[in-house]
Amino acid sequence: MSEFRPTLRPALGSKQPVASATFGLSTLPEGTIIHVLARPGEQDVAHLLASLNGSDPHALRPVSPDQWFIVRDAAMPHQEMKGLFAALEPRASGVDQSHGRVRIRIEGKTAQRALSKGTALDLDSSAFPVGQSAVTLIGHIAAHITRVSSDAFEIIVLRGFAECLWDDLTRMGLEFS
């Protein structure tokens, strides 16, 4: 009997980047996304995660109380992921979400205005500074937004909604491109 090997295709592989002088939309590498959940009552798990995570300033993203995403551009080798999960125990657990979520980058001087068309979040830099993350709706789609620079955001969305969100974001940016 032959061994089944699934073909992995990028969720947004057929989508072309959108670029203008003030607005850009692009896919990001389908690297690593790990959802970390702290055990009830555990303290300072964020400090533990920061110490395990390295120097990337936006690799650790809060999701909700006692939950975080660890995000990396590159795929994490199995042994490294296994070591990370072991280092989390018994204070937290990790779940590999790399194949279930997709990252999209929206950037440029008008990115905030375009993104504001679809979400109720106050994306002004005084209310949503660089490094801030939030779970919200963009239209009807649940998404996790992080401001990664003064004029750029990363959006994490469930893989099955990525293409629809991409189309929505493209429409939101039409007036700027």
Image (cartoon, helix red, strand yellow):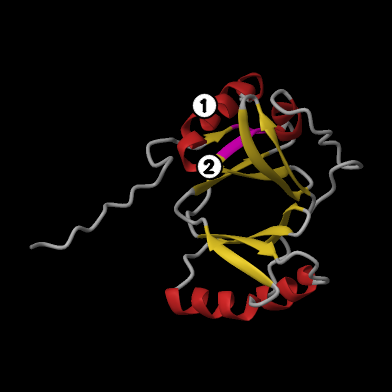
Q: Nearer the viewer, mark 1 or mark 2?
A: 2
Can you give x and y, in whole percent of width and height, for residue 152 in the image?
A: 70, 44
Can you give x and y, in whole percent of width and height, for residue 101 in the image?
A: 51, 48
CA distance separating discs 1 and 2: 15 Å
At numbered mark 2, what does the secondary structure look like: helix, strand or loop? strand
Image height of 170 relative to 35, above or below: above
Q: Is residue 66 magenta?
A: no
Mark 2 lies on residue: 158
Specify the segment rendered in magenta. 20-25
Position of the N terminus, as image quadrant, is bottom left
**The one of 105 and 134 positioned closer to us in this rendering:** 134
- The extreme right residue here reads 126
> Is there any visible trace of residue 85 in the rendered image?
yes
Q: Earlier in the sequence, mark 1 or mark 2?
A: 2
At numbered mark 1, what does the secondary structure look like: helix, strand or loop? helix
Q: Which kind of residue does numbered mark 1 sit on? A: Asp
Determine whether, in the image, residue 130 is placed left or right of residue 8: right
Residue 61 badge: none
Residue 167 badge: 1
Determine whether, in the image, residue 169 is placed left or right of residue 118: left
Which residue occupies 39% across, 47% down? 10
Can you give x and y, in whole percent of width and height, for residue 141 in the image?
A: 60, 31
Determine whether, in the image, residue 16 is placed left or right of residue 9: right
Which residue occupies 62% across, 80% down? 87
